[in-house]
Amino acid sequence: MDQIEIIKEIGHGKRSVIYLAKYKGKNVIYKITHVLQNDIDEKNSRYYATLKFYEDIANHYPNHFLTLLDHKIDENCSFEYKYRIESDNSKEAHQSKICLITIEYPILDITLKDYYHHINRSNNFETIASKQRKIYSFVVQFNCMFMLMQTKGWYHLDSHSKNIMGVYTEDKYDEMKINDLKFKIPLFGIRWYMIDYDPMYNKSFNGNVVIKSGAWDYIKNDFHYYLINVIEYILYQPYWIFILNTGCNWKCTDITVKKILNSPNTSYIKQLLPDIQEPETLKSCAIALAIVLEPEAYMKYRGFDKKISTEKFNKLLQLTKNGQYFDADDIKFYVKNLNDPEKNVRYFIDKLNHT
Ligand SMILES: Nc1ncnc2c1ncn2[C@@H]1O[C@H](COP(=O)(O)OP(=O)(O)O)[C@@H](O)[C@H]1O
Ligand SMILES: [Mg+2]
């Protein structure tokens, strides 16, 4: 740890700052995070879960997870977080004198969020088919990472679009071994990583205690950890276009969901929903499906045709449609098999090999 030489800051989250650094002749990530006393108490602690996750999974799959090179707890650290502190419960952590430092590898190129923006902008030269292949490859890689984590009971409770990063590569394929399964994944220029292992959850370490973090407090069903993130952040980019343009999120849409599921022209969505009991997940699936498959109907059910001008309504509709890289049939297949990632992986690999 003494051999570390910090070069520059390259990112931050809600309570940590990430630096580019040099360590034993290598470019590495230096992450410093404020933590609370109970985060570092061995049993059931977040910190313990993070380290265990490196040991169990991450360190063994350097092509899709970060490798931990070194770590330490500084119980009297002078690190001060200089960004806006968002929530009251993180305020407590920011006043803590305890810091967790990790040194990780490799340096990655781009977050999923920025990659989406990039793809959307590069519409001059790139065909829709080419963009689609890149997104499908991402979905395959993401599902493989999910399956890998699942082999040892791990869930990433915060797999949003900035906790997923890619590195550009010339490699055409990646071989991924998951238990006794083997997949040959076409990469289309980018290899995807899950990053940020603070919110790793495993029943055998954390029991039924769900790590408190915003929306996660109410979670009761294992699958939900994964599904809700896929729905919100990954598969349905149009969903985000919609949210960004209307300022409305899924939390306020109970009535809309009922309308969608009971109306004559969108009621078929009911049949597409995966076989999962968790109501929040089903709700997210229903909304996402409605936005992607029936954006016009969805907007009408939410009353946007009355709230905004026809011109703005049509523009929003167009934006939503433009951001769709998934074929309707593929979306239906994916959501129907949401709790069978292996089936989805095989289906999409097959598609990628035949386009
Ligand atoms: N290995 C990496 N390579 C390049 N950038 C990184 C890497 N790890 C983190 N970052 C950048 O730092 C940001 C925050 O990192 P993260 O580990 O998610 O911290 P937090 O736990 O605070 O959210 C990321 O969204 C990304 O922009
Ligand atoms: Mg993060």
Image (cartoon, rainbow, N blue to C red):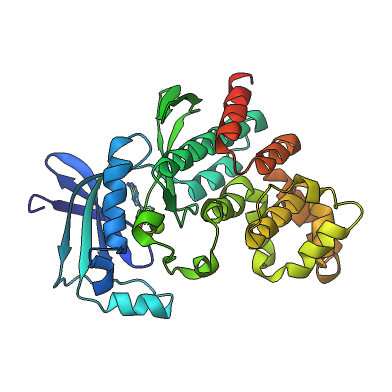
Position of 224 with respect to 91 (left or right) is right
Q: Quadrant of residue 61?
A: top left
Along the viewing direction, whichever of 133 and 120 lies nearer the viewer: 133
Ligand 2, what quadrant? Answer: bottom left
> In x, y percent, where is residue 164?
44, 47
Seen as rendered, the residue at the extreme right is 264
Which residue occupies the foreground of this view, 278 or 94? 278
Left or right: where 264 falls relative to 29: right
Residue at 68%, 56% (x, y): give it. 282
Quadrant assignment for the C terminus:
top right
- Residue found 41% across the figure and 47% down from its top: 153
* Residue closest to the far left: 2
Q: Nearer the viewer, residue 115 or 288?
A: 288
What residue is shown at x 29% (from left), y 64% (from top)?
45
Q: Nearer the viewer, residue 201 or 7?
A: 201
Residue at the far top in the pictured view: 354
Q: Is residue 103 above or below residue 168?
A: below
**Would residue 269 be found to the left or right of residue 25 on screen?**
right
Residue 11 position, x and y percent, is 34, 57
**How many numbered marks appear?**
0
Question: On screen, 32 above or below 22?
Answer: below
At horizontal 31% and vertical 56% (from top left) the residue drawn is 49
